[in-house]
Image: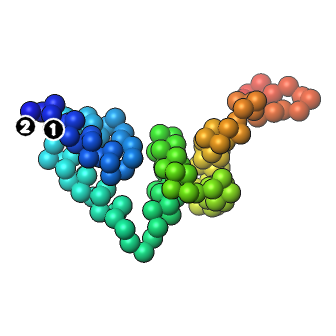
Amino acid sequence: MSDQVYVEEYKTRYMAMAGYMYPQFEYLAQEDPEFAEAWFSMMKAWRRDGPIPAKYKEMMILLGSCMKHQDMAIRTHMRKAMKLGATKEELLNLMEIVLLSGGGVAFVKGVGILMELTGAHEGMPDSPKWGDAEAPSDV
């Protein structure tokens, strides 16, 4: 099998398993097929049917992604959780848990992406409102 044929086959299998594929994993398949296969096996193993429903597995991965401030992963796993039936209310509650365990930055990133994915960000400012006073000069 040629390298490009393998990469295309890997992408097809990965998309069928996960429903998405980070560009980094396509690169991995091109550069180190043996490791790519090991990664695929691990991803497939945690996604198998078991006592924790898929929606909640995605929400757990989402929580970790928020705590690590990984925007692409937050967006990816939030979309996947929504496709699996997670509601806006469940995701907002998860972001409230993120605030307790991951702090303000993780919370703001997660809620911002939730707003983006649900359309709630339309018409919202990109930065905080400062009231009648000007923003502090040192900000």
Q: Of helix, strand and loop, which one carries label 1?
A: helix
Residue reaching furthest left? Answer: 1
Residue 6 is marked as 1
Q: Of helix, strand and loop, which one carries label 2?
A: loop
From the viewer's perspective, is 121 left or right of 76? right
Residue occupying image coordinates x 63% and y 56%: 87
Residue occupying image coordinates x 29% and y 46%: 14
According to the image, label 2 marks what residue?
1
- Tell me if label 1 and label 2 are in contact, CB under 8 Å: yes
Residue 103 coordinates in the image, percent (x, y): 62, 53
- Among the two numbered marks 1 and 2 on one chain, the one whose residue lies closer to the N terminus: 2
Residue 74 is marked as none
Tell me the kind of residue under disc 1.
Tyr
Q: Quadrant of residue 113?
A: top right
Which quadrant would the N terminus be assigned to in this image?
Answer: top left
Could you classify mark 2 by the number of other residues whose Cα lies within 10 Å: few (under 14), some (14-19), or many (20 or more)? Answer: few
Residue 90 coordinates in the image, percent (x, y): 64, 59
Camera-side residue: 52 or 105?
Answer: 52
* Total numbered circles: 2
Residue occupying image coordinates x 56% and y 57%: 85
Residue reaching furthest bottom? Answer: 51
Residue reaching furthest right? Answer: 132
Residue occupying image coordinates x 77% and y 24%: 137
Tell me the kind of residue under disc 2.
Met
